[in-house]
């Protein structure tokens, strides 16, 4: 293995070169059965329990296409603004490797089911970048190899490998972008945002579980550099299986820096695959691109063409949910949040929670106040998602009503919220059980006020003499005596009334 | 006559993981050229007005519903495996893509 690659600083790389990106994102569909067989499509089961003869590539078997997988693929194509093919075929991609027992992967080659689309990707500061989609095609996943005997479970130094074919035949849609130019120094951020947007779309469509940690969404990232101002693309590398949003960003950044160092020293970039290492945040050389990539595709003889009628496509289009980006835009306008406010809400992951809270009767401002001001912080402390704290929209509406109705002040409401989270009941129940009642009956207040005035006669005299601002000391005494359960504004009014002074 | 070089045959043999001797490569280069010529005669029958086809029967949209059906037990799945371990197929370590 080569020594650690030289890298240039990202800033210097950006001064001298323009990056060109390209992504292949594989999405595992969440159908009940596999792409071409009726074996179950389930993650995490015991090895080789979800396979049948078709998945194992036994002689004489006949694959049959899963209708639901085709529908999911068409939906993905439509959500990515693609054309849906009038007719398309499957093809065999021939290669020898134990992850496919058939010695070929059933895929699509020159006739993908969806092509020529685009996706608008929003960066963190709100900049929108359009990514052109080349194609989205249907194929099947491969089995899972575990390398045994090597030091770290990687292929290097392994003595043998064990193969589980449960994943073989799981329906996949591979989404391929056109070359992405013009991202400049935002390329790493765009890489992350693009994969995040695709993940959000397939999740929103309900066609994939979209859990990256389970490999439901996997990304191969292509990076090349060209000298600033040039229009001829440089030689690219393809970093395989970058499987978290964070790694996508880091891998693109690293490859830009590595390419820049090679080119800046007068070298040439080797066209090759790269392996991403999360621990060191670097890539290492994989296989060079060569005629080993001669996959000898040919039309799959066992499967007849898929010809989606326009009626079928339109039926599917009618079932598409509102796209996530449009939904966010609509909610932002409806709620009247400022850009920064809404971005915080999105980043905190409480858009849905606020939507439900507003639907339950809270004002958008109140909903935001409770979620962002109270619940998000508590969730962070407990290291869980805000929604997992178990505060229902109805509870928030009730709690907010108690504050607005003058029954609780904000401090007490926080304590009630703690009680709700602790499972002590509804806000009203918690309030009563904990004895958190804002004192609004004036009699106990007046007693406390009289006591406070008697305790500080000189202050009382000052107020009578017109120094109204001295009232704070008396208010403080009353609040202390009522353990903070009095409405400070009302206390002030009562004190001034008592002393015959107008505010 | 179609031109199939010895290198073409060696390349194909490598892709197909077939070990061939020098003599076999020479022999096959000549024979493959004849085979390609024989297949070529099809293109004389089918002119530009005949669309390319991958299937002899005009069928399309043959689907199955997304219903879970037949599965093998791990023992059945592994019954034909040359080697197995921990309910999985055991294969030599091959340095390639993961």
Image (cartoon, coloured by chain):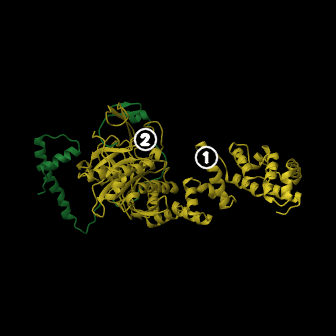
Chain colours: A yellow, B green
Q: Residues within 10 Å of mark 2 (few under 14, many from 20)?
A: many
Nearer the observer: mark 2 or 1; the answer is: 1
- Judge whether residue A470 can be spotted in this image: yes
Q: Chain of mark 2?
A: A
Measuring from the top left, give residue B27's x and y in whole percent.
11, 45
In the rendered view of the protein, which quadrant contains the N terminus of chain A? top left
Q: Quadrant of residue A97?
A: top left
Q: Is residue A367 left or right of residue A79?
A: right
Give residue A166's mark: 2
Residue at image location 62% in from the left, 58% down from the top: A355
Up-down relation of residue A432 to residue A118 (above or below): above
- Judge whether residue A437 can be spotted in this image: no
Measuring from the top left, give residue B61's x and y in whole percent.
41, 58
Q: Marks 2/1: CA distance?
A: 37 Å
Q: Is residue A232 left or right of residue A69?
A: left
Q: Mark 2 or 1 closer to N-term?
A: 2
Q: Chain of mark 1?
A: A
Up-down relation of residue B28 to residue A341 (above or below): above
Could you say which is closer to the camera, residue A94 or residue A453? A453
Reading the image, the residue beneath label 1 is A379
């Amino acid at each position: 293995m080569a020594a650690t690659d030289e890298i240039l600083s990202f800033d210097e790389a950006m001064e001298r070169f323009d990056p060109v990106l390209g992504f292949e994102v594989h999405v595992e569909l969440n159908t009940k059965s596999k792409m071409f067989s009726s074996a179950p499509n389930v993650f995490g089961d015991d090895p080789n329990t979800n396979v049948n003869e078709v998945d194992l590539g036994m002689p004489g078997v006949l694959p049959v296409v899963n209708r639901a997988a085709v529908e999911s693929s068409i939906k993905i194509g439509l959500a990515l603004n693609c054309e849906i093919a009038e007719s398309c075929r499957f093809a065999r991609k021939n290669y020898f490797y134990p992850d496919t027992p058939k010695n070929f992967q059933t895929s699509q080659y020159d006739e993908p089911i969806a092509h020529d689309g685009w996706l608008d990707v929003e960066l963190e500061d709100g900049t929108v970048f359009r990514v052109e989609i080349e194609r989205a095609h249907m194929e099947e996943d491969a089995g899972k190899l575990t390398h045994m005997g090597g030091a770290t479970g990687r292929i290097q130094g392994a003595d043998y490998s064990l193969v589980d074919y449960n994943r073989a035949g799981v329906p996949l849609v591979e989404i391929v972008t056109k070359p992405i130019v013009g991202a400049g120094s935002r390329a790493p951020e765009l890489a992350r945002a693009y994969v995040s947007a695709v993940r959000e779309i397939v999740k929103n469509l309900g066609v994939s579980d979209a859990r990256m940690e389970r490999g439901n969404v996997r990304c191969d990232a292509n990076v090349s550099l060209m000298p600033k101002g040039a229009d001829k693309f440089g030689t690219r590398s393809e970093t395989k299986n970058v499987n978290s949003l964070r790694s996508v960003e880091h891998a693109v950044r690293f490859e830009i820096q590595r390419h820049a160092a090679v080119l800046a020293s007068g070298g040439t970039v080797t066209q090759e695959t790269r392996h991403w290492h999360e621990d060191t945040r670097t890539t290492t050389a994989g296989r060079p691109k060569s005629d080993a990539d001669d996959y000898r595709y040919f039309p799959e003889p066992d499967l007849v063409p898929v010809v989606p009628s326009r009626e079928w496509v339109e039926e599917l289009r009618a079932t598409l949910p509102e796209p996530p980006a449009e939904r966010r835009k609509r909610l932002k306008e409806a709620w009247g949040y400022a850009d920064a406010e809404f971005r915080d809400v999105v980043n905190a992951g409480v858009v849905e929670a606020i939507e439900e809270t507003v639907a339950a009767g809270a004002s958008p401002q109140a909903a935001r106040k409770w979620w962002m001001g109270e619940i998000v912080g508590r969730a962070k402390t407990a290291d869980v998602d805000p929604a997992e704290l178990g505060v229902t929209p109805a509870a928030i509406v009730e709690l907010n009503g108690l504050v607005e109705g003058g029954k609780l002040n904000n401090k007490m409401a926080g304590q009630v919220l703690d009680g709700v989270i602790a499972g002590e009941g509804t806000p009203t129940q918690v309030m009563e059980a904990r004895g958190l009642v804002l004192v609004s009956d004036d009699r106990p207040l007046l007693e406390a006020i009289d006591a406070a005035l008697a305790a500080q006669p000189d202050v009382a005299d000052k107020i009578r003499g017109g120094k109204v601002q001295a009232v704070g000391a008396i208010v403080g005494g009353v609040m202390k005596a009522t353990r903070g359960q009095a409405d400070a504004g009302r206390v002030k009014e009562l004190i001034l009334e008592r002393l015959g002074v107008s505010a | 006559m179609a031109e199939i070089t010895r290198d073409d045959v060696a390349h194909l043999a490598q892709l197909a993981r077939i070990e061939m001797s020098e003599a076999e490569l020479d022999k096959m280069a000549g024979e493959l050229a004849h085979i390609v010529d024989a297949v070529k005669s099809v293109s004389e029958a089918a002119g530009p007005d005949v669309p390319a086809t991958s299937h002899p029967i005009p069928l399309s949209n043959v689907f199955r519903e997304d219903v879970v059906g037949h599965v093998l037990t791990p023992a059945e799945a592994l019954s034909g495996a040359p080697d197995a371990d921990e309910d999985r197929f055991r294969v030599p370590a091959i340095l390639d893509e993961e």
